[in-house]
Image: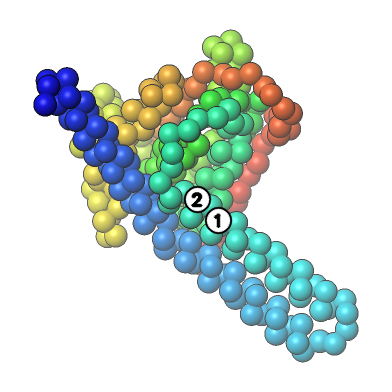
Amino acid sequence: MTERDDCQKHLAEIQALREELMQAQKMSSVGALASSVTHEFNNILTTVINYAKMGLRHKNEETRDKAFSKILAAGQRASKITTGMLAYARNGSDRREVMNLVELVEDVLVLVEKDLQIHRVRLQTHVEGEPLAEVNASQIQQVLLNMIINARQAMDGGGRLDIGIRANPDSKCAEISIRDSGAGIPGDQLRKIFDQFYTTKTADAQGQGGTGLGLALARDVIEAHHGRLRVDSAVGKGTTFTLKFPLAQARVANKPTNIIRSSTAATQP
């Protein structure tokens, strides 16, 4: 075997190990959502059972139509969550395509919405312009999911999460920002958070968090997309991560612009 062949073999092994690490990180994120997804499916089943009983008890068409509508809506919600979770958990290819980042973010929010409600985190999203970028959807969704879970964990006891998606014509970038109202990161730690195996938190009771790999992988993914990952934080005021990608040209009309959406957290018992 020549020196060049040996080098190519080692590069292939490194790439294979990196893909395995990405998949392990992906499954760790799925594990962090397992409790909330189970909770939501329990609520969906309760809705289906209660409205099925109501439909059986009442004979008039109006009541039965209402019951069927509620059962259908609950089933569609369950299908959307299941489809999103399975698509996220699958190994993704290296294919990239021009996507509206709003749609990409919304697919992630389907998975985390109940988790945020359970932990009393109020979610608000802002959309400006038509943020199109050429991305690998699976990889970027993995980065987003990890960052949203990190943000939720930084807001122990509840808080506010703002997600902004915009097209910035001045910098020619499509941007996604994730801002939490948590404790913030001290300056001496902020310089190290993208280092492999460096973490500012310990693993929780379920073993989630504390590996120090999520942000290092996120930076690698964003840079591989010719983008940038920026962090701003102040102790006591929260942290903002901003993902920037080269802005792609619009091919078709997409979502409406300048949208604000809110999701109110579940009330405390």
Determine the residue positioned at 48% across, 61% down. 37
Say whether residue 80 is left or right of residue 258: left
Label 2, on which residue? 87
Label 2's element?
A: helix
Label 1, on which residue? 83
State the residue in front, 125 or 267.
Answer: 125
Whether residue 200 can be seen here: no
Q: In this view, does 30 lie above or below 213?
A: below
Label 1's element?
A: helix
Name of the residue lying farthest toward the front = 1
Give coordinates of residue 12: x percent, y percent: 24, 32
Which quadrant of the figure contains the N terminus? top left
Determine the residue positioned at 39% across, 42% down. 146
Say which amino acid is labelled 2.
Ala
Q: Is residue 65 above or below residue 136?
A: below
Determine the residue positioned at 56% across, 25% down. 133
Q: Which mark is residue 267?
A: none
Mark 2 neighbour class, 10 Å CA radius: few under 14, some 14 to 19, many 20 or more: few
Residue 193: quadrant of the picture = top left
State the residue in front, 94 or 74.
Answer: 94
Name of the residue lying farthest toward the right = 61
Give coordinates of residue 155: x percent, y percent: 40, 45
Whether residue 139 can be seen here: yes
Tell me how the rendering is colored: rainbow
Determine the residue positioned at 85% across, 87% down. 59
Give coordinates of residue 119: x percent, y percent: 46, 55
State the residue in front, 213 or 237.
Answer: 213
